[in-house]
Image (cartoon, rainbow, N blue to C red):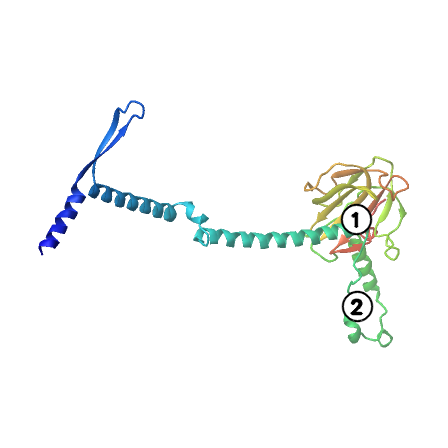
Amino acid sequence: MAKEGKKRKEIKRKLLNKYRLVILNEDTFEEKISFKLSRLNVFVTGWLLTFVLITLTIILIAFTPIREYIPGYSSTKLKKQATDLTYKTDSLVNVLNYTNRYLENIRMVLSGDIANNEMNRDSLFEQVKIDPSTVDLSPIKEDLNLRAQVALEDKYNLFGKVSSESALVLFSPVSGTISQEYDKENRHFAVDVVAPKDSPIKAVAIGTVIFAEWTTETGYVIIIEHKDNLLSVYKHNSALHKAQGDIVKAGEVIATIGNTGELTTGPHLHFELWSNGGSVNPTDYIDFK
């Protein structure tokens, strides 16, 4: 017991013994700063500093963006951002695919290509056709008069029997002489209208300009998108008065007659109509005289 008590007193004495830490000037040995220390004070101060450093480190990691730089750490915010970026990437891919298909359709219109897999709707009714030889198909007088009246009313109506409020009336883009007719078999999906150079070219209907640029083969070209999936195309112009994205009214001047491009032999308008991705004969709906 006496030895244990002696040891305790010795440890207590060592812990509480006072020491003096002095900082001297090396040249003059002048005392600058001095501290009174004990082993217990040094021990307690060291543990306090260690605790403070550990606490500050935990706070920095838990409540500041520094934690995101720790390998293997993934915050909820980063996960949300990654998810949002994934959705945006998918959306951009879909938009890009749609744009590529749209530009491919424009390219087909500019080059005069047409799909080879058009459906022959008449073949759908082949099995239910009635033999005309067994039916009297001679029209009566009233029927002939009605057909003539309807044909006159619908001559320039692209969409057949529709109400007068929704009918799309097409105006003549230019007055002149047709030098080359529409010929689908020879891949001439347009009518060439000869007119004096610099004559104004007008929009056939209200719509939005989706293409207005120079091309090597057909010179200055302008394409207008109308309602009901209708496109009107004007080629070989000498100048364009509208730009892509402009909204034009029916009869508004959009270009002037010219002779630009490699595939032209004189001032004229190469005019095309495309409905639902297929070419149609413009003279069926427009009077160019």
- Whole-percent x, y for residue 109 in the image: 78, 51
For the residue marked with disc 1, what is the amino acid? Leu
Q: Nearer the viewer, residue 157 or 141?
A: 157
Q: How many marks?
A: 2
Q: Is residue 14 above or below residue 197?
A: below
Q: CA distance from mark 1 to mark 2?
A: 29 Å
Instruction: Note whether residue 109 is visible.
Output: yes
Residue ID at (14%, 47%): 10
Instruction: Note whether residue 228 is visible.
Output: no
Q: Nearer the viewer, residue 286 or 41?
A: 41
Number of other residues with Cα within 10 Å of mark 2, as a class: few under 14, some 14 to 19, many 20 or more: few
When asked about the image quadrant of residue 289, the answer is: top right
Single out the residue that lies furthest toward the front: 3
Residue ID at (37%, 47%): 63
Numbered disc 2: secondary structure: helix
Judging by the rendered image, the residue that carries numbered circle 1 is: 110
Residue ID at (71%, 56%): 162
Number of other residues with Cα within 10 Å of mark 1, as a class: few under 14, some 14 to 19, many 20 or more: many
Single out the residue that lies furthest toward the left: 2
For the residue marked with disc 2, what is the amino acid? Asp
- Whole-percent x, y for residue 191 in the image: 85, 48
Of the two numbered discs 1 and 2 in the rendering, the one whose residue sits closer to the viewer: 1
Q: Is residue 34 above or below residue 167?
A: above
Judging by the rendered image, the residue that carries numbered circle 2 is: 122
**Which comes sooner in the sequence, label 1 or label 2?**
1
- Whole-percent x, y for residue 276 in the image: 73, 56
Numbered disc 1: secondary structure: helix
Instruction: Judge left or right: residue 255 versus residue 80.
Output: right
Q: Nearer the viewer, residue 257 or 83?
A: 83
Q: Nearer the viewer, residue 39 or 198?
A: 39
On-image quarter of the N terminus: bottom left
- Whole-percent x, y for residue 113 in the image: 81, 54
